[in-house]
Image (tube, grey):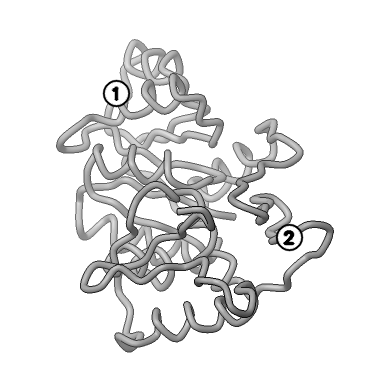
Amino acid sequence: MNILLAEDDVRLGKLMAHLLQKEFHRVDWVKNGHDAYDHAKMEIYDVVILDWMLPGENGLSVCKRLRERGIQSGILFVTAKDANKDIVSGLDSGADDYIVKPFEFNELIARIRAISRRKNKPLEVLVSMDDFTLNLHTHELIRGNSVIELTKKEYHLLELLMRNQHQVMTREVLFEKLWGYDTEVSDNALDALVKLVRKKIDLPGKPSFIQNVRGIGYKVKHSDV
């Protein structure tokens, strides 16, 4: 399961991110509403956990904008607001559930699993570029009628680049998304990962599908550009 956590309380956020990562493996943690919206529109999450009172843009606004954009991820509000009118406002904005602070972690996990079970997900979501097609649900990369085998990290790198094919992904963003916000991975790990993917997908004598933007990061490039 892929989780996005938006919590500006650093102490609580760090604890929640750690416990959620142990339970669900993939967790991205952001500390303001703007980053929550940007992450949720960039990547497919099973559940987005939104603190109500986020800086920059509150959770209620983020939830409304995500639903207006057509984002179908499950949304769970974490809030200190327990008045009935606030709960109704949260659910009316498009949230699937809410939990009131303080809460037991086991209850949070149960609510996340319940949201994940009842969400109606499309059978498949495809991202295509040139002769590549990335299936975001089966995690397959397809060229023509052939499936190119990728590791989890290789797939995640291509997913990030292909979902953002009109912009350069900075090294900092790629490191955070691939290895987490608190990592001890060496600086050349990203370059090594790119090299492995290139070996699997590039054709002899053709420019690499993954382009290095010196001093900034990487992007994918159309063959006719």
Amino acid under disc 1? Ser
Which residue appears at 38% of the width and 27% of the height? 63
Q: Give residue 152's mark.
A: none
Q: Secondary structure at mark 1?
A: helix
Q: Secondary structure at mark 2?
A: strand
Amino acid under disc 2? Arg
Quadrant position of residue 155: bottom right
Quadrant position of residue 82: top left
* Horizontal side of residue 37 vs 42, given as left or right: left
* Horizontal side of residue 129 vs 93, given as left or right: right
For mark 2, what is the residue?
143
Which residue appears at 69% of the width and 40% of the height? 117
Query: Whole-percent x and y of residue 197?
Result: 56, 76
- The number of callouts visible is 2
Query: Whole-percent x and y of residue 203?
Result: 64, 74
For mark 1, what is the residue?
61
Which residue appears at 27% of the width and 44% of the height? 35
The answer to whether 23 is drawn above or below residue 36 in the figure is below
Eye-nearest disc, 2 or 1: 2
- How crowded is the residue under tag 2: few (<14 C-alpha within 10 Å), some, or many (20+)? some
Residue extending farthest to the left is 56
Query: Whole-percent x and y of residue 141?
Result: 69, 61
Query: Whole-percent x and y of residue 44?
Result: 53, 45
